[in-house]
Image (cartoon, helix red, strand yellow):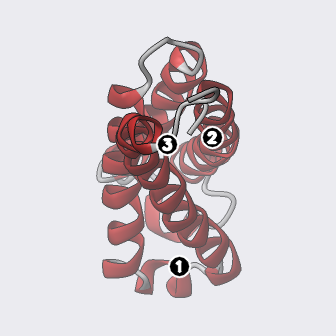
Amino acid sequence: MTHSMRTLILRADAIPLAFFGLSGITMDLLGYFAGIGAWKDVFLNNPLAIGAVEAHGLAIIIAVLLIRHAAAQDTTTWHVTAVAVHLLLGICNLVFWQVFIDVAIAPIGVVATAYHFVFIIANGAALFLTRLSPEIASAMPKTGE
């Protein structure tokens, strides 16, 4: 896989991650402080909102890091990071799916969860195909021989 394709995958991954993180943290804080939005009945003055705020805040930080390092010469670490982040978030969405139903945002949950699994596949493919590239290149016949 080419470097430009790996860069594109990381950037395409980071943009929705930042969007979901920013939207999520906004809803979390509105629910906690003002009792409005999807989380109003769950988070209003509830200190357990800290978990959601931290998770969405970390998503924003990770998105910034992915964008910042997408053009690095060796993107392997960042693809591994992205796979790990999306595995955690995607699996948590599935395990705790009831929360999306309870606050009536199941369609958002579907989109977010699908996004996580799409980018597990995309970043995994970047890792796998990058590892294969040198082997494939060495097996190809040389031009002019």
Q: Which mark is residue 9?
A: 2
Give the CA distance from mark 1 to mark 2. Answer: 28 Å
User: Badge 3: how crowded within 10 Å, few (<14), some, or many (20+)?
Assistant: few
Residue 50 in the image: x percent, y percent? 34, 43
Q: Which mark is residue 140?
A: 3
SS label for mark 2? helix
Residue 10 in the image: x percent, y percent? 58, 34
Give the mark nearer the N terminus: 1 vs 2.
2
Residue placed under numbered mark 1 in the picture? 100
* Kind of residue at disc 3: Met
Identified at 66% across, 36% down, the residue is 5
Identified at 42% across, 18% down, the residue is 74
Task: Tell me if 85 is positioned left or right of 42 in this view.
Answer: left
User: Quadrant where the C terminus lies?
Assistant: top right
Q: Nearer the viewer, residue 63 or 13?
A: 13
SS label for mark 3? loop
Q: Above or below — where is 64 with respect to 15? A: above
* Kind of residue at disc 1: Phe
Give the mark nearer the N terminus: 3 vs 2.
2
SS label for mark 1? helix
User: Quadrant where the N terminus lies?
Assistant: top right
